[in-house]
Image (cartoon, rainbow, N blue to C red):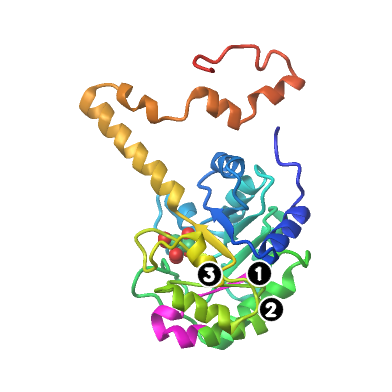
Amino acid sequence: MLYAKTTPEQKRVALREGLASGTIQQFPGAFNPLSARLIEEKGFNGVYISGAVLANDLGLPDIGLTTLTEVATRAGQIARMTELPAIVDADTGFGEPMNVARSIQELENAGLAGCHIEDQFNPKRCGHLDGKNVVDLETATKRIRAAADARRDPNFLIMARTDIRAVDGIEAAQDRAKALVDAGADAIFPEAMRNLEEFQAIRDAVDVPVLANMTEFGKSELFTTEQLASAGVNIVIYPVTLLRSAMGATERTLDTIKAKGSQQTDVENMLTRARLYELVDYEAYNHFDTSVFNFQVPGQH
Ligand SMILES: C[C@](O)(C(=O)O)[C@H](CC(=O)O)C(=O)O
Ligand SMILES: [Mg+2]
C-alpha cells in the first residue's frame, strides 16, 4: 500500500547482490509508476527508467531536452512504487562535472539504486542512431569521477555508458571501458554492440558488471538472456519495450474505435478493471477505511 517498504539503501544492496549473483539480471523499462508494479509482480530483478521513454512520454525527442528536475522527479515516482531496485538513465549527467555531481545527489535523494552517465557530446542522441559523437577521454573520465565522488551512499551504482563503439570501433570501446572503470565506474554499459562477440570483448576488458541494451529497431540483434549470459553480460535492459507495446496497443484501439464506432472488439486485450485494482492494491486501503473497497468488481472471477 502507498509506497514501497524497501528503503533506497536496501534496494542498492539488492542491486549489488544481484549483479554479483552470477545470474543475469533482467530490467524491463517502466514507462510509469504503475508499470513498475507489473514488472515487480512478474518476477523481474529490477526496473529500468529510460531517458528516451521519459522524453518521448512528454512528446519530446530523446536529444537531451529533459532537465535534471524532470528526470529525478519522474524516476523518483517510479522508484518509490516498487520494492525492486531502479536504475535511471542520466544521459550525459546534465552538464559539466559539477552538475554531474549534483545530479547524482538528486538521484540518490529520489530513491534510485543507480544510474548511467554516458560519454556523448551535448546535445546527446539516441545511442542507436547515426550522427552521435563522443567527448574525449579526459572529459569522459572526469564525468565519472565526479559522479563517484559525489555519492553519499557507497552502494549507489555509478554505471558508465560509452557510445564510442559506433564512432571508433570495438577496440576503442574496450580501452574506454577500462579507463572509465579506473575513473570509478561500478559497471559498464557498452552502447550499440553489433554482436555477441563484441559483448564478450567488453567482458574480457573489464572486471565490473556489463550491461546489454536490448532496444528494438536498433543496432543490436535481440539476443536472449541465455545468449547474453554466455557472453558474460550481467544485466539486460529492455528500455523502450513496454512503451512501444503500450503505444502499439493504444494506436490499434484508437483505430478500432474510429473504424467500428466502438472499442468492443479490443476489450478482451485490455487489462481488466479487476487487474488494475489489484495492481494499485485497492483492497489494502480498506485497513484505513472499510468503505474504500466494499464493492464488487464486475468480472472478478
Ligand atoms: C537506452 C536508451 O538510452 C534509453 O534512453 O532508453 C536509448 C534507447 C533507444 O532509444 O532505443 C538508447 O540510446 O539506446
Ligand atoms: Mg537514453
Q: Secondary structure under badge 2?
A: loop
Vertical order, 97 against 126 (above or below): below
Q: Position of residue 36 (x, y in %)?
A: 58, 44
The residue under the point 73% across, 54% down is 11
Q: Residue 158 bears which disc, if any?
A: 1
Q: Secondary structure under badge 1?
A: strand
Q: State the residue position of label 2.
A: 184
Q: Amino acid at mark 3?
A: Ser
Question: Magenta includes 275?
Answer: no
Q: Amino acid at mark 2?
A: Gly
Vertical order, 153 against 182 (above or below): above
Query: Are discs 1 and 2 less than 8 Å apart at CB?
Result: yes
Query: Are discs 2 and 3 less than 8 Å apart at CB?
Result: no
Mark 1 → mark 2, Cα distance in angstroms: 8 Å
Q: Amino acid at mark 1?
A: Ile
**Toward which corner of the image does residue 68 lie, by quadrant?**
bottom right
Vertical order, 131 against 42 (above or below): below
Q: State the residue position of label 3.
A: 230
Question: Magenta includes 170?
Answer: yes
Along the line of sight, the residue nearer the viewer: 301 or 190: 301
Q: What's the magenta region?
A: 159-173
Mark 3 → mark 1, Cα distance in angstroms: 24 Å
In this view, which residue lies farthest toward the left?
Answer: 259
The residue under the point 56% across, 56% down is 26
Sequence-wise, the earlier of marks 3 and 1 is 1
